[in-house]
Image: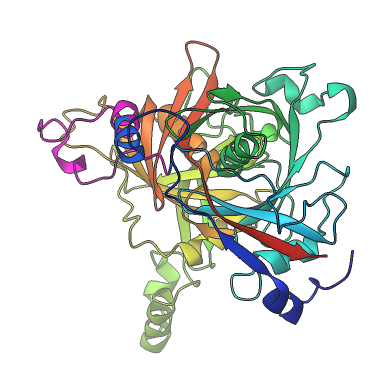
Amino acid sequence: MSSMLQAKASAGVRSRLRVAAVSQGAASPLGGKSAALRSRAAMEALSGRRRGNGSKANLALLPPLRAGSDALEDVAAKEGYADSRGSSAVYFYKYQGLGNDFIMVDNRHTSEPIFSSEEAVALCDRRFGIGGDGIIFLMNPPTGGASDESDSDSAGGSGTDYDYAMRMYNSDGTEPEMCGNGIRCLARFVAELEEHSVPRSYKFHTLAGTIIPEVNPNGLVSVDMGEPRLEAAEVPTTLAATGESEDHPGAVVLQELEVGGEMEAVPDAEEMFAPYEERMEKNIARRTQGKLKERWLVTCVSMGNPHAVTFGRPGEETLGGVLDVDNLDVDYYGPLFEKHATFPEKINAHFCRALYDSPESLDDLTDAVKVVHWERGAGKTLACGTGACSVVVAGVLEGRLKDKCLVYVPGGPLQIEWRRSKDNHVIMTGPAQLVYKGLIPV
């Protein structure tokens, strides 16, 4: 492969990239009703909300779970577009799930990703490349379907015979274990590429273990994400278990995490009796971002990749939390969490507020939560599938959320269910949609 993509501002990417827009008006092979009617029916059935009944008055303005498009697109290579296998140009496909967007590449002709991590950075650049939160490679499964140790806690268990494998790079070139929105997009990509009838499920080998998504006729994709891992060493984090959860005594639940600077929010006795100029100088410093030490309450969860979930700071606790997630400076706090020393493999951070209409007691639980994400290796994103799963698990452990919730992320809602009483698996349901396709010269 040439080194054409190694420079982010490569003129080759700009001048030789050809993009073919995908028609959204084709007739659907999935039934007689219009796409709009079928999508709306799917939204209402999955959201479980009826507007205007007064029971969820404060939540009525939030959007329902939407299917981006229920009609499977024909993404097979057509005349005028060389197939990616063995050609001098690679056919790519741009998919998105709630605004979390990915470049898809059919990589089954070779055992390693055809693009390097440096080339992935160039391709994901939104000004000089295609643009995306990551690039995902559809791979052949491991020879003989052999499983790794991580499969013992994943959706398929050990000894799974895989249909496909998934590899990916984040937009910064790092390789994550897995991506929840990405696996939904990949499943939809496979169904459209192979022209499979739906509903259909697939077993994917990932670095997080076996993941099983199912493409539904209504345009949504449901994914069995396996069991959450809650022990501190499994996340991993050096934060100590708190014993807050009777069912999971080794879990890190509502543990304090210090971020920011070294200054305490409240002056000590020495500072209070210091000269006036010194006191004023420190008061000004406290108003400067990054100087003040801040404490947050976090719950840590692994969904095959590490997550820290917070509903707020100690001393400010209410049932739903008090975070103004719409105005939170995620660009400031996100990196402080991601690169914190207590997370040896870094962390995905999620800032949350549980949504209630009128809770009557501290025992009330809700099935709605609003979240903003900071993803390890990608920064602030519109959606994070594994993050949404970790939020529901954390909310249940903290006594805020029901086992089945709508998680409202900036890109729209995801339905998450933690089947604690059945198999302890987490099920994620949400949309995935082809945006466009084109050619990358190599």
Q: Which quarter of the figure has residue 111?
A: top right
User: In this orientation, does residue 433 appear?
Assistant: yes
Residue at the extreme front of the image, as rendered:
79
Give how far across and how far down residue 424 sits, in percent: 54, 17
Residue drawn at x 87%, y 47% as measured from the top left? 112
Residue drawn at x 55%, y 34% as measured from the top left? 252
Give how far across and how far down residue 401 sits, in percent: 35, 30
Give how far across and how far down residue 380 sits, in percent: 51, 60
Query: Does residue 51 lie above or below 94 as drawn?
Result: above
**Residue 66 on the magenta span:** yes
Residue drawn at x 85%, y 62% as measured from the top left? 88
Q: If the image is split into quadrants, where does the C terminus sit?
A: bottom right
Query: Does residue 18 lie above or below 84 as drawn?
Result: below
Q: Is residue 165 left or right of residue 309?
A: right
Number of marks:
0
Give how far across and how far down residue 120 sits, in percent: 74, 61
Residue drawn at x 65%, y 37% as measured from the top left? 190
Name the one closer to the observer, 199 or 352. 199
Name the one closer to the observer, 300 or 100. 100
User: In this orientation, does residue 130 appear?
Assistant: no
Q: Which quarter of the figure has residue 147?
A: top right
Q: What stretch is highlighted in magenta?
A: 42-68
**Residue 168 on the magenta span:** no
Query: Does residue 389 lie above or below 170 as drawn?
Result: above
